[in-house]
Amino acid sequence: MSVLLILMLPFVGILLPPLLQRQGRLAATLGAGIPTLLAFGLLMSLGPSVLAGEVLLASREWVPAMGLTAGLRVDGLGFLFATMTLGIGLLVITYAHFYMKKDDPLGRFYAYLLLFMGAMLGIVLSENVLLMALFWEITSLSSFLLIGYSSHDSEARRGARMALAITGLGGFCLFAGLVVLGQIAGSYELSVILASGDLITSHDWYVPMLVLVLLGAFTKSAQFPFHFWLPNAMKAPTPVSAYLHSATMVKAGVFLLARLHPALAGTSPWFFLVGGVGIATMFFAAYVAFYRHDLKGLLAYSTISHLGLITALFGFGTAGAAVVGVFHIMNHAAFKASLFMTAGIIDHQTGTRDIRILGGLRKAMPFTMVLALLGSAAMAGIPLFNGFISKELFLKETLDLPLMAGAPWVFPVVATAGALFSMAYSVRLVHGVFFKDPTEKTPKEARDPSMGMLVPVGILVAICVIVGIAAEQTAGPLLAAAAGSTVGGELPYYSLSLWHGFTLELLMSAIAIGGGVVLYLQRARLYEIADRWPQLTGQMAFEKVQGLILSFAEGLTARLENGSLQRYIVLLLGMALVAGALPFLEHGFVTGTAELTPTNPVAIAVWALLVVATLATVFTHRSRITAIICLSVVGLLISIIFVYLSAPDLALTQLSVEVVTILLLLLALFVLPKVAPPESSTLRKIRDATLAAIGGAGMGLISWAVMTRPQDSISDYYLENATYPVGGGTNVVNVILVDFRGFDTLGEVAVLVLAAFGVYTMLRYARHTHVEGVDDMASDRYPVVLVSVSRPLLALILLMALYIFLRGHYLPGGGFIGGLVASVALILQYLASGIDWAKERMGVSFRYVAVAGVLLATLSGGAAFLVEQPFLTMTLLGLKIPLVGEIDYVMTLLFDLGIFLAVVGGTMTILSQLSHMQEDREPFDEEARAKETDPWKP
Amino acid sequence: MEALIASAIAVLGGSGIYLVLRARTFTVILGLALLAIAVNLFLLSMGRVAPGHAPVIEEGLELGAYVDPLPQAVVLTAIVIGFAMMSFAVVLAITAHFVTGTDHLDGEETS
């Protein structure tokens, strides 16, 4: 339980700094610091049992159906990393309070930092590897926010983007790799994976899986050739660099190597990939670091180099090397965090980080000088400092590599050369900043900073010194516990003492230290040579690739998306035809064997009329009124066909929709031109006709294929249950609509109402726009006969609508049809007597009717919740009404009434708004128009 | 009879597609109307041809005496939604005409 609490504290804490920052920066800092301190305290309380070798597990169900549990795990390795994450996190929070600009309220900064901290804890404390991958992604995202914190700085944004691209891509590979790993091991739980090392390393998929996992680790830990994001991330505020690039973010990669060491290590692909990349990175980055003039740039490359060293140690694959790797993780975190903070102090106090400008600060900043000197000594690996012991052990490990028996000298030589450059850049850091004569004045007058910035550095440096002098007594137990879970078995013999006698590794150390000093003394000549070489960096390659991808994407988009809707439709239809044709090509076309229905002369006549009317619509489409008339004939014939096909409900619906549709199209011609110009070329017509013929034939053939086969439908259930007691009606179509599939119906009326609101909104804008050439029909007189007939008809048709609505559950009819018929009755008044006359008498806006309808339908469905039944349970309530009799299905009736109202409201909103178009149009007034908010243009 | 229905669907669908491919918004809407009718008929045909077997329950009839009601329920809502979609398209065409000054589908008079 307390494990979960430790993990949750930073996430919960995210809210505090932004909320507290109004009370001042100190409140924000405390808001970030207190949850961290609490989590740290809780973690320490677990210390005794973890150091005794226990593995604490806590888990809860995640996706039980897939056998996933969200498990947490505290073992030695996780404990070490959690300690570093929270401990250095505390120091960084303190340091940042003094370092960050005084006008920065810090709420956002600390929120990002806590998010990152929580994610990092998640990585190191996850038992489930998929959960770990999730936290891994969060660290990539939150580090993006932290690196790009100075969002006004384009360099910072670029650095953040690059970090996100590289680590995000790596995270993707890692996720794939972990999924493969989980499939191999048969579980995503670390406990299982760590115990099935032999199964994993002998599996066919071992190498692809390993490459994917390593891509994740190498991108995160900035190993060559993915290292270049790290120097570019130095645009982050220095506390962020100190945190991300010493103890956390980049350490996640090596953590992964350590974590999976028992399951994956010890094979020759592992050795050559991990060991090879590690040692190459170690040397290469140390070499580059020596040539950096920016303090943080130097430290960035130094970080890459040390990560390479750690990677190489894990790559060696032996238990002894793994112990040293874990030890160096601890040491590096301590001295590198202190040095980043020192670099921040120098930048903060002098205004520059350029080693060429700086110099002679030993007098102005004595405290800083002492701390920097001690930290650098640890980094260089001078005796009596922690870095010395782990480096010495590292050099020893390079001497004994069974897989390099053919060329045993390679690793020791490269390692010594790397250590030599490491010494050289450390000397440069101290001498260049504090001792050599300054070349020019620094932007600010240098002096030691406040204690708030010095104390965190001091604590870290003290750790470096104490561990350096008495490693076994101080760091020993923690190392033993952490290394124990890395090795996954008995720990080999190792000694953390300073003096091992005159050994080969001591000689290598001496060469490195001496050579480093010599190298530094010769620096002027070396820089001259380096300047002559062409610059070719990973960053340039990255930007080149990025540019290529972007221009490819832009080219592709420009080709596909040229702005012509007509073209999109052709493409879409073409794709649909191809997709529809594929099954035909694969399986062929077979007519079924079912008995056909005999035809009759009436049917043939209707069919002939339908074909003629349809084709007439096509051929007359340019003279639009004629086309609308032809279309209305098609609609009427279809409703006749519905009657023939035993679908009386559909016939009624089609008939009433036909009326409103034709009205809609005629209204549209108030505004749109009534005649279209001829414009398609013959070639185009042939192309479109071909597409149309294929499409039409396809539809016809599929329906033919279905109709000639015997039927096996799920509808028997509906037919059996439509009546009492389940559905309570005899018109099965209506029962399906209001009961069995009521949820669909609810969604569908909602769509109708939404469309009506879309129409309403668009036309509100259009009403105020003047267009040339629109007929002014408002002045026409309304035909007397129509006016006098339509008014009594209103009552009759409404009565008819009510009748159709009420009987719907038992005979053809219902809410949809009743609503449409009522709409026809109402719209007739608009046509006959004019908008104003009708509007005055309507009394209520149809938009409200529509909304009320949807609400009523929803509530009548939701009533079921009151008696703990599922949504849209209809058999709730029966009522006895005098004179009418007993109504068993009140809820069904209410639901159908909702549909009725929604249909009336939606349809009438659409039609009445369209009718308004030419009635309400205001005289064209450019100024008035300009005052209107124009929703269509930005 | 099945052949008549299938060929009617083919003619309606083909005509709809042809009109949808034309260059003017109103013609596209006409095409959509035809296409919607074709699709509705197509869906209904999935319930097979069974004249005189309306799905209204009467005492004493076997299940086989009724045509499949499910396609009918689907088509009924499809007709209403089709109307909603078409009115939206009509108003979109009108608004586009206001904004661009043309009823060409691409928003500009092209060759």
Image (cartoon, coloured by chain):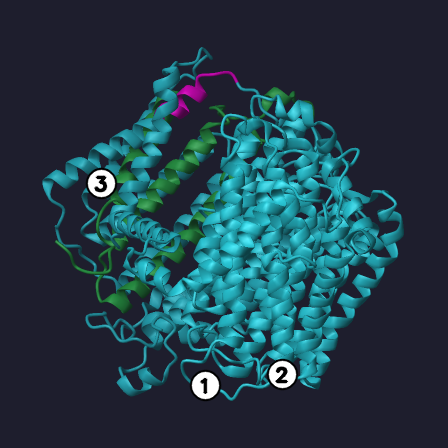
Chain colours: A cyan, B green
Q: Is residue A194 left or right of residue B47?
A: right
- Labels 3 and 1 positioned on one and the same chain: yes
Instruction: Give the label on residue A449, or none.
Output: 2
CA separation in Å, label 1 and label 2: 16 Å
Q: Quarter of the image holding residue A315?
A: top right
Disc 2 marks which amino acid? Pro
Q: Which residues are magenta?
A: A699-710
Instruction: Give the label on residue A443, or none.
Output: 1
Q: Does residue A29 appear anywhere in the picture?
A: yes
Residue A712: image location, x then y, percent = 57, 20
Q: Nearer the viewer, residue A613 or A341?
A: A341
Q: Is residue B59 left or right of residue A836?
A: right
Label 3 element class: helix
Furthest-left residue in this view = A682
Circle 3 residue: A616
CB under 8 Å between discs 2 and 3: no
Instruction: Give the label on residue A41, or none.
Output: none
CA separation in Å, label 3 and label 1: 85 Å
Report the residue at 37% width, 27% height from top: B5
Q: Is residue A709 magenta?
A: yes
Report the residue at 30% width, 50% height from top: A548
